[in-house]
Amino acid sequence: QPLPLPSREHNDHFLYLVQEKEIPYVIVHGEDDSVISVDHAYALHSYLTKTPLDISDDTSACTTSIDNDDRLFILKECDHLCWITHGHEVVDILGNFWSNTMNEK
């Protein structure tokens, strides 16, 4: 049996914790994802940071940190299975995220 989807209340609580309690997060998304559009990653990041996001920047590198923000990474030439097709890059991103997060405490 499939797991139930998170409730609206659950999602609101998650967003509250990230925004108001400043819980660290990182978003890693494949640019060519046809299952969940990359627009969702941009929109989530924009919502969490409470700032409009200009996605017109040159993002020609394979792994791109948007606006020099170390919380949103869009992987070039990558689909929905970024942890499989770009595993080394994802591990590097997550490793750097955890290292930086731990150093901030």
Image: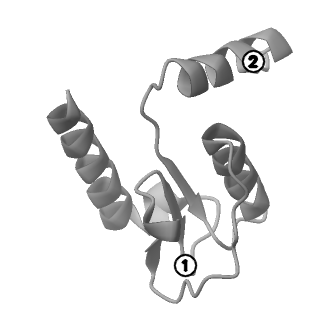
On screen, residue 67 above or below 49: below
Residue nearer the viewer, 40 or 87? 40
Q: Secondary structure at mark 1?
A: loop
Residue at image position (45%, 82%) is: 62
Find numbered disc 2 in the image and state the secondary structure of the residue it sits on.
Answer: helix
Whichever of callouts 1 and 2 sits on the residue coming sooner in the sequence is 2
Residue 57 in view = yes
Question: Pointer 1: what residue?
Answer: 76
Identify the residue at horizontal 72%, vertical 62% (top origin). 38
Distance between the Cα atoms at labels 1 and 2? 30 Å
Q: Please tell me how crowded label 1 is: few (under 14), some (14-19), or many (20+) other residues with Cα within 10 Å.
A: some
Vertical comparison of 38 with 98: above or below: below
Tag of residue 12 = 2
**Dot 2 amino acid type:** Asp
- The colour scheme is one colour
Q: Is residue 23 above or below residue 68?
A: above
Estimate how packed mark 2 is, as few (under 14), some (14 to 19) or many (20 or more) residues with alpha carbons within 10 Å.
Answer: few
Q: Is residue 3 visible?
A: no
Outermost residue toward the front? 51
Where is residue 29? Give x, y as percent: 58, 59
Q: Residue 5 appears at what percent x and percent y?
A: 79, 20
Q: Residue at x 42, y 33 (%)?
A: 24
